[in-house]
Image: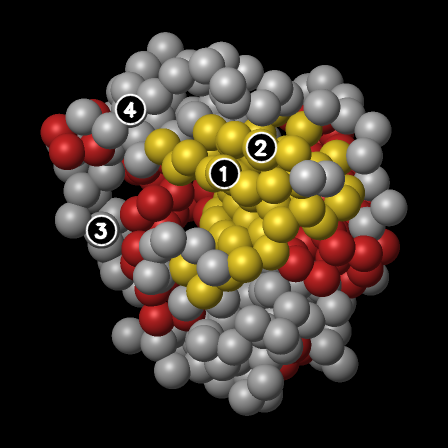
Amino acid sequence: MMKHLPWVFFLFALPFTQSGCGGQAGDSSVAQAADQQRPRVAGENNQLKSQAKTPAPGMAGFAPGRVIHVLVALCDNEHQGIVPVPAKLGNGEELAGNLYWGAGFGVRTFFTKSAEWRLVRRGAAPDPAVLERCVFRHRNKDAWLVADAYRGREIRQTISDFFAYVAGAKDRMLEFEMDSRPVRLAAGGRADLITYLGHDGLMDFRLDNYPKKLDDKSRDAIMLCCLSRRYFSEPLKPTGANPLLWTNGLMAPEAYILKTAIDGWLAGEGGERIRERAATSYNTYQKCGLRAARNLFSTGW
């Protein structure tokens, strides 16, 4: 199995060599080896189909507003195909310092510090694969963000859940209190925007099957991992989801990209404008050059 270098390995290297998977963007040896691991699309999972029967958000007591569900596979030196990062960043069982969760540009940290989002719930999730679930409420718009931190060794489950959600399966019903009032959210397969963030596990393994679209709901998808357009494209098509943002090369999957893309999505912007937002943000933090950053991101088919 090819080892992929996380972005921190390249902090002091030439521009645009930092990556969540490693190597230089567009490296042909990485691409050729990775092509051999491309996933195969299987038929519809009947078990998933039976789970897509819950009322939509805003109905039957569910909180109104659009729902974003973010699935984060914690960086893991031991269980993922990467060259190890410092132990604190790459412990897939540790939330506080994990590269993609508790570190400075991790999802939990970045959104908690954001002026636009308010952390309203933080705690365990009923799924044993998920170490922590955070729920954020937008301060100015009618929107919720549910972020799940999957154990690093559960990266296969993380990606499997991502495809189930974008196909409309595996509803996740959340109940909690906010400001002393009960809140019910319909996430998972009932979310409006679904994101995967972390190492591109499809470079290392195939899932047993990939679901087809189960209902008539329109869903957007963001895939922030290395070469996601190459590896997620084939299994994403049968789900009917719209690829709002994905990547063409090796990259650092950090939360500022996600936040700026969500900002555009909530503002009703189209894919090209959101792509430009992502590129501008990436260049601001990574100093890789705006042209290179634009080439990194794609939108749509």
Q: Real-space Cα distance between discs 3 and 4?
A: 21 Å
Mark 2 or mark 3: whose residue is earlier in sequence? 2
Residue where numbered disc 4 is placed: 52
Asked if residue 93 is positioned above or below residue 107 in the image, the reply reads below
Q: Nearer the viewer, mark 2 or mark 3?
A: 2
Residue where numbered disc 2 is placed: 183
Q: Amino acid at mark 2?
A: Val
Q: Which disc number belongs to residue 81?
A: none
Q: Amino acid at mark 4?
A: Ala
Q: In which quadrant of the rendered view does residue 263 lie?
A: top right
Q: Is residue 1 visible?
A: yes
Q: Residues within 10 Å of mark 4 (few under 14, many from 20)?
A: some
Q: Secondary structure at mark 4?
A: loop
Residue where numbered disc 1 is placed: 175
Q: Quadrant of the N terminus?
A: bottom left
Residue where numbered disc 3 is placed: 207
Mark 2 or mark 4: whose residue is earlier in sequence? 4
Q: Real-space Cα distance between discs 1 and 2?
A: 6 Å
Mark 4 or mark 1: whose residue is earlier in sequence? 4
